[in-house]
Image (tube, grey):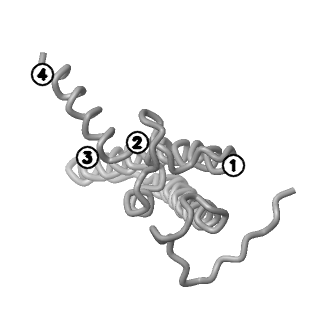
Amino acid sequence: MKQEVFLPDDYSPAEDEPFMNDRQLEYFRRKLLHWKHELLVGSRDTIEALQDGTRNIPDVADRASEETDRALELRTRDRARKLVSKIDAALRRVDEGEFGYCSVTGDPISLKRLDARPIATMSFEAQERHERREKVHRDD
């Protein structure tokens, strides 16, 4: 069983400490779990609102507007669902000791990038190369 890591409330990963040490891993684990919790709460709220919001609106324009809002909300929730699966994958990488390393080069991903996007699987440079290749193939 893993030993619990003490993490001060004001802790922020720093470049001058060993990369992906126990404190950094715990910091990112908590960040990912908090993000996932927020997304799941939002999804529950949406489901409740959609169930409660089913009503008969006689005006065609108002009904169309409501249906558009519901479709947009469902698309947003679908994105959140996909994001939750990426968060779960990042949490698995934390547990397996692979978190924070580029899946393409194996190099460390910058702490700033991970702090901004903890589900990142590629370094900034590898991500840019990937997007350039994607754009080239899309333009064909």
- Could you classify mark 4 by the number of other residues whose Cα lies within 10 Å: few (under 14), some (14-19), or many (20 or more)? few
Residue drawn at (44%, 57%), measured in percent from left and top?
Answer: 114
Which amino acid, by three-letter code, is at mark 1? Asp
Q: Can you tell which mark lies on residue 95?
A: 1
Q: Amino acid at mark 4?
A: Asp
Pointer 4 or 1: first along the chain:
1
Q: Residue 32 vs residue 96: left or right?
A: left
Q: Residue furthest top?
A: 140
The C terminus - image quarter: top left
Give the quarter of the figure containing the N terminus.
Answer: bottom right
Residue 122: mark in rendering: 2
Q: Amino acid at mark 2?
A: Met
Question: Nearer the N terminus, badge 1 or badge 2?
Answer: 1
Q: Of helix, strand and loop, which one carries label 2? A: loop
Distance (Cα) linking label 1 and label 2: 18 Å
Residue 128 lies left or right of residue 90; in this view the side is left
Q: CA distance from mark 2 to mark 4?
A: 23 Å
Q: Residue 31's spot in the image, x, y percent?
A: 55, 65
Q: CA distance from mark 4 to mark 1?
A: 39 Å
- Residue highlighted by disc 3: 64
Could you tell me residue 20's position as x and y percent?
A: 58, 58
Horizontal and vertical percent position of residue 81: 51, 44
Q: Earlier in the sequence, mark 1 or mark 3?
A: 3
Is residue 53 found left or right of 37 in the rendered image? left
Residue at 52% of width from left, 58% of height from top? Answer: 39
Q: Are marks 1 and 2 in contact (CB under 8 Å)?
A: no
Nearest to viewer (mark 4 / mark 1):
1
Pointer 4 and pointer 3: residues touching (CB < 8 Å)?
no
- Give the foreground label among 4 and 3: 4
SS for tag 3?
helix
Label 2 – label 3 distance at C-alpha: 42 Å
